[in-house]
Amino acid sequence: MVIHSEFGDIQVRDVPIHDAVLGRAAVYGDRPAMVDGVTGKEISYAQLDAMSRRMAAAFAELGVRHGDTIALYSPNTILYPVVFYGATRAGATVTTVNALYTAAELAKQLQDSQARFLVTVSAFLPVAT
């Protein structure tokens, strides 16, 4: 049985995810794009765009090239999108890793995805290493 939506089909955009999300960041400028629910810290659209571009440049300096895979092993933080969009801007594919994974589960995902790089937070270093 196939269930169809009562709504019409959507048009899928053929653009990179960072362009789909941040393509109009300049229009939104200083308006909050991200708000940390715990600390109240905000990142504006302009800041998110600029930070993800700097992150992309840093990845490029590290040797990240189009087609590489970067594993993102982190809890949801206000900087998570900066790393994610920075990686996609650098041409990489991002494999997101469950924050609750054991070392064995992480290793399996890194092998399966053929990740060249792993980005994590200090609290996850014991499992990551």
Image (cartoon, rainbow, N blue to C red):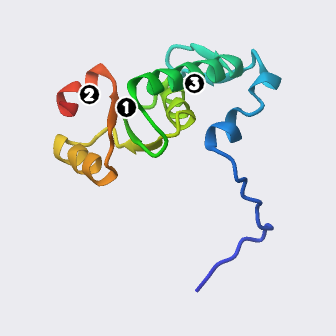
Residue 52 shows which numbered tag?
Answer: 3
Residue that numbered label 2 is attached to: 124
Per the model, the C-alpha gap separating discs 1 and 3 is 16 Å
**In the picture, which quadrant includes the C terminus?**
top left
Q: Is residue 4 above or below residue 96?
A: below
Q: Residue at x 78, y 31 (%)?
A: 24
Disc 3, disc 2: CB below 8 Å? no
Residue 78 in sight: no
Residue 13 in sight: yes
Label 2 Cα neighbours within 10 Å, binned few <14 / some 14-19 / many ≥20: some
Residue 72 percent coordinates (x, y): 39, 36
Disc 1, disc 3: CB below 8 Å? no
Disc 1, disc 2: CB below 8 Å? yes
Query: In the displayed structure, does residue 120 sit left or right of residue 129?
Result: right
Question: Who comes first in sequence, dot 1 or dot 2?
Answer: 1
Of residues 94 and 105, the one nearer the viewer is 94
Residue 1 percent coordinates (x, y): 58, 86
Q: Residue at x 28, y 46 (%)?
A: 110
Identified by mark 2, the residue type is: Phe
Residue that numbered label 1 is attached to: 74
Of residues 75 and 12, the one nearer the viewer is 12
Identified by mark 1, the residue type is: Ser
Per the model, the C-alpha gap separating discs 1 and 2 is 7 Å
